[in-house]
Image (cartoon, helix red, strand yellow):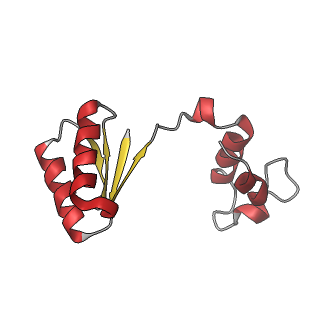
Amino acid sequence: MLLVVTYSRAARTSLRNVCRTHDETVVRRFGRAALLDDTHHGAFLALRLVEKHGADVHVELTRPLNEFADVPDEVRAAARAYEDRDSPSTPYHAFVRDTDHPSPSTLRGRHL
């Protein structure tokens, strides 16, 4: 998918117009950003916005997260255990003390 982010009022207006006119290519809208299909049409629409608004439009090629292929088992297990904790107000750093779950600093230091 293509993530299109706008940084000016004029660029947001153009993005909104593109999304309304070409809803078959729009995956999701987020106000000042949108996800477009990663098709030639999606790229055309994104590049039109870049041509019109320059640095006020940023485009990234993204891919959906597949939690089973992209995320290690230990991270999924930690998220599951943390959401199932006894006290909902316990912060993660306190929750992982004396467990085998990864620490917050360990999680921050590893890329997917």
Q: Is residue 70 visible?
A: yes
Find residue 44 and report its image quarter.
top left
Find residue 109 and report its image quarter.
bottom right
Judging depth in this view, the residue of 13 and 27 nearest the camera is 13
Judging depth in this view, the residue of 83 and 92 nearest the camera is 92
Judge whether 75 appears above or below 68 on screen.
below
In the picture, measured across the screen, residue 35 lies left or right of residue 75, that is: left
Q: Is residue 6 visible?
A: no
User: Where's residue 9, x and y in %?
Assistant: 22, 70
Judging depth in this view, the residue of 88 and 6 nearest the camera is 6
Give the residue at the far left of this rendering: 21
Quadrant in which the C terminus appears:
top right
Q: Residue at x 29, y 60 (%)?
A: 54
In the picture, measured across the screen, residue 98 lies left or right of residue 72, that is: right
Q: Residue at x 19, y 67 (%)?
A: 10
Q: Residue at x 28, y 53 (%)?
A: 50
Quadrant in which the N terminus appears:
top left
User: Where's residue 20, x and y in %?
Assistant: 13, 49
Q: Residue at x 70, y 43 (%)?
A: 75
In the picture, measured across the screen, residue 21 lies left or right of residue 43, that is: left
In the picture, measured across the screen, residue 52 lies left or right of residue 57, that is: left
User: Where's residue 104, x and y in %?
Assistant: 74, 59
Judging depth in this view, the residue of 89 and 57 nearest the camera is 57
Find residue 77 and report its image quarter.
top right
User: Where's residue 66, x and y in %?
Assistant: 54, 33
